[in-house]
Image (cartoon, helix red, strand yellow):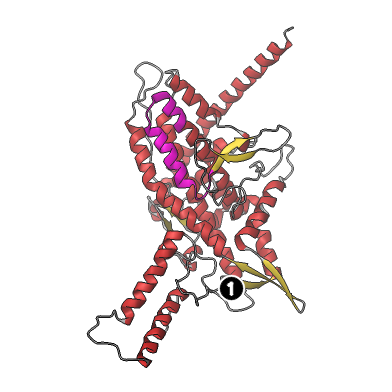
Amino acid sequence: MKLLMKNPTAIFLGLTCLTSVYAQGLGEASDPSEAEPSFDERARTDIEAFRQRYRDRGIPATPQDEEWAAPSDDIMVRKAAWDKFTTDLTTNMPENPMWYLLRSSHLLRYFSRDAEVMAGGIYKNTKNTLWLDFRDEYFDIVAPLMTEFTWEQPDPKKRGNYFQSKHRTPAKPSGLMDRGGIFDSSFPPDRWNSTMPDGSPNPYPGDTFALKVAVSKLFQPRPEDYDGQKVVFISDTRFDVLWTTVKQVYDRLGPFTKKVAAAANKEKWKLGNPGGAATRKVDLNSRQTREYKREKVGYASYYEKFWEEFDVYDEHDDPSKWMQSEWVTGLILGHRMNVYATTNVFVAYGILVVTVYNSVLALMMDMLADIALRANILARSSVASIDPLWGLPKDPSFDLDVSILEKYPEWTEGVYMTWGFPIPETILPMVEPIFQQQREERDQQYELWKQEKEAKKKALDNWDSIDNSKPK
C-alpha cells in the first residue's frame, strides 16, 4: 500500500504518539479501569491541535514539546538555477507575475487611501457614525497586509513616505506590505506604460529594485560554496505567510463588502437634473473566469480583465504622491453642497471596497499561484532531496496542488477556479461578441470622459496663465 505523506508534520506527530504508547507498554501495566483515549484518538487530537495553532497564528506552528525541533523549510539549489529564477521575476515587467503582485499591492494602497477618505467625508456630511465604523473596520481587516496609505512629504526636496492614518490610536503594527515588510511595496513605483514618452522602452529601474528586494525577502537566499560547487539555500516560509495572509484578508473582507453594499444601496440618490433616475447599486457579482487565459494571452492581456476598475490609478503620474484622487474629493464636496452628481457617493464607496475584494486581492491570489508554480519547479531541481510540496500553501484549507497551478487558476468566490464561472466555458464563445460590444461602448464613454477632463484642464491652465500675466 502506497502512503501519500501530504503533511509530514502530521505523520511525525502520529509516530510520536505511537512511540509514547510503546514506551508505556514497557513500564508498569496501566489500570484497565481508567478510560484512556486510544492511540487513534490521541493522534487525531494532536494533529488537530497542531492545525488549529497554525490557523490561529497564520504562521508555521510547532508542537509544545521541548525536545522537538521544527523541520527546515530550506531547500538547496544550484546558484545558476536560483539566478534564473530571480531574473525571471525581476525583468520583463509586463509579462511578470511578481511585477503584477507588486502593482496590485500599490493598488491596494491607493484604493484603501481613497476608501478611507471617502468614508470619513461621508461621515462629515451625514453625521452618521456608521461610516466611521466602516472606515475603521476596513482598516482593521487590511491591516495584516497594509496599514500605511497616507502620503506625507514634509520636505519637498526629499521623497515622502506612507504613514498610518492619524485617526488610528494607538498605531497598528505594520503590515507585510508596509515599509520594511516581507513584501515591501512602499518604493516609488515606475509608470505603468511599457514605453517612455519618447517611445523608448521603459527600463523600470524603480520596480526592478523593489522586486529584487521582494524576492530576496520572500525566499531568504543564503549562498554557499562547497569545494567550488556554488549553491543557494532558500526557504518558502515567508512566501507562505504572505500567501496565507492575503487569503485571510480576502476571507474577512467578504462579509464586510455585503454589509457595506446593503448600507449603500439603501441610501437614496438621484441625478442632478429634475426627475432623474436613481443611480446604479453596488454590484457584488464576481468577474467572469476563463475569458482571458493568461497562459495563452500573457499577463498584459490578462490584466485587461481588471483594467477598467484600475485605470483611474494607471496614470502617467505617480498616484502615490496624491493625497487622494480628485474624483473622491469632488464627490464628497458635491454631496456636501447638495450637488447630486451622476455618481452616487455611497455607491462609490461600496464600489471601492468591492473592487478590492473582487479584483485587487483576486489579482494578488492569481499572481501568488503563478509564482508558487515557478517556485515549485525550482524546488524540483533541488541538489538534495526534492520536496514535491515546496512553494505550495501549508494551510490545508487551500486544497491546492501542482496540477491545479499548472492550469493557471483564477481566484473567484474564495476558491481557485479552472472552469468558466458564472458562464460555463463551453458557451463563452457565443457570449464573447456581447462582451466585446460592451467593452467598446465603455471604451468610447471613457475616451469622451478623458477628452472632457483634458479640455477642462487646459481651460484651467489658460485661466491661470492669464491671471498670472496680470500686473500685481
Q: Residue at x 46, y 28 (%)?
A: 121
Q: Residue at x 52, y 34 (%)?
A: 443
Residue 87 vs residue 19, the one in the foreground? 19
Residue 152 makes an appearance in the image: yes
Residue 354 makes an appearance in the image: no
Q: Can you say which quadrant of the picture contains the C terminus?
A: top right
Q: Residue at x 61, y 69 (%)?
A: 378
Tell me which amino acid carries mark 1. Answer: Arg
Q: Is residue 124 magenta?
A: yes
- Give the residue at mark 1: 380
Vertical comparison of 278 with 435: above or below: above
Q: Is residue 456 magenta?
A: no
Vertical comparison of 340 with 227: above or below: above
Q: Residue 196, percent across and down? A: 71, 40
Q: Can you say which quadrant of the picture contains the N terminus?
A: bottom left
Q: Residue 330, percent across and down? A: 51, 24
Quarter occupied by residue 326: top right
Q: SS for tag 1? A: loop
Q: Is 260 placed left or right of 445 in the picture? A: left
Q: Residue 171, percent across and down? A: 52, 43
Vertical comparison of 167 with 19: above or below: above
Magenta segment, prevailing SS (helix, strand or loop)? helix
Quarter occupied by residue 279: top left
The residues colored magenta run: 119-147
Crowding near pointer 1: few (<14 within 10 Å), some, many (20+)? some
Q: Is 450 placed left or right of 141 in the picture? A: right
Q: Total number of numbered labels?
A: 1
Q: Residue at x 48, y 38 (%)?
A: 439
Specify the farthest residue to the left: 33
